[in-house]
Amino acid sequence: MRDDEAGDPSLASLGLLFLRIGCTSFGGHMALVSALQDAVVRKQRWLADQDVLDGVTLASILPGPVAINTVAYVGYRLRGAAGAFACVCGALLPAFVFMVALAGLYFRWGQLAQTGRIFMGIMPAVAAIVLAAAWRMCRAAVRGRREAVVAAGAAVLLLTCPGALVTLAIVAAAALVGRLWFHAGDAGAAAPSAAPPATRGHAGVLLATPVVLLPLLGGPATVLVKLCGVFAGLSLLMFGGGYVSIPVLQHAVVDTHGWVTAREFADAMALTQLTPGPVLIGAAFIGLKVGGVAGAFAATVGIFAPTAVLMVGCAHRLRRWHAAPALQPALRGVRAAGAGMVIAAAVTIGRMAAPVWLSPLLFGLALLLMLRWRVEALWVVPLCGALGYFLL
């Protein structure tokens, strides 16, 4: 429940709070969500735990990155569309700056033999990070043989026929299968919390404002528009979070448009593990190569803004739909398919690892560190990179 006695937080305080959260949220989307919950619920007492949980649930259903969608939801609950805009910008700015800086260094020095050895060590670690995420998701979403069948089918389909349309078809099929196979009483839903406040301002106008600034950043307008448009279209087809989207993103930027090579795409995914943000911030890496800093900005706006707009626009209605018993079996199927698609993402990244003796050893080490000793990805990735540099 909102802490009404404390009053609504200002937009400036929201932006600064999420800027601090964004600077420290290394280790994947759950790290950001955990920091968000600690700040908004425990310290500031602006929302209750159930409110944040509602946001995570809705973000898991909608396309796009779970963490940023959750940030948009929390900002909307606190200050309407303007709050969502302030929170998303604050949370993404550190990751964007990190990625642009790392990508700039990569394009200057990335082709050196020494740097190549570092990335040969990092790639098995990234595959292990994705597989660890898949394992956690499977433990939560796959509770029987039927869920296992849905998850396995989703993984096989995405590995066999990668693409955005295939991903959308998998989600639709999983919802239909879940509706037919599972019973509403098997997946109880928490009661929805109070309805969010009325939107202060138009969500689409506020969250689309950065697009208007694109021409001011320089660079060919047609390139910027194409980058923003392609990534915007991809974002609306990326169900299941960032890791699930890796095969779809690779198919679009490597196979379809040829903006980066397969090696550069793999290195971009590795660099995302060194930034305090979602894996889809790798879009800034691709945009930087195609259109400079303006291209990085255009790609980042394209990959994050549409799903944030969708989250704000559908929050009130979807929260009521989520509580409907008839929808629970379909959601159960979608969650199982999401787990399978994350497994497919892990396999896709694993294929990019160098075929050398050290790769499986680093993969096993990284997986053990994260699953057995719960070491954060922030430490696993540099460790494996250093081992690759000195042992290869």
Image (cartoon, grey):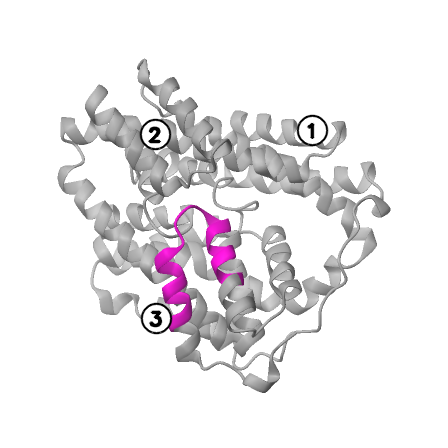
- 34 drawn magenta: yes
Residue occupied by mark 3? 212
The residue drawn where x is 37% and y is 66% is 19
Q: Mark 1 against mark 3, which lies toward the viewer?
A: 1
The residue drawn where x is 62% and y is 35% is 138
The residue drawn where x is 33% and y is 62% is 93
Task: Check the picture and name the quadrant holding the C terminus.
Answer: top left
Q: Which mark is residue 136?
A: none
Measured Cα–Cα span from mark 2 to mark 1: 27 Å
The segment highlighted magenta reads 16-37
Residue furthest top as drawn: 357
Q: Residues within 10 Å of mark 3 (few under 14, many from 20)?
A: few
Is 257 left or right of 48, judged from the image as shown? Answer: left
How far from the left and from the top, in percent, is residue 368? 46, 27
The amino acid beneath tag 1 is Ala
Label 1 vs 3, first from the N-terminus: 1
Residue occupied by mark 2? 123
Q: Is residue 76 visible?
A: yes
Q: Which mark is residue 148?
A: 1
The amino acid beneath tag 2 is Met
**Measured along the vertical axis of the image, is residue 114 above or below residue 225?**
above
Is 161 left or right of 114, judged from the image as shown? Answer: right
Task: Check the picture and name the quadrant holding the N terminus.
Answer: bottom right
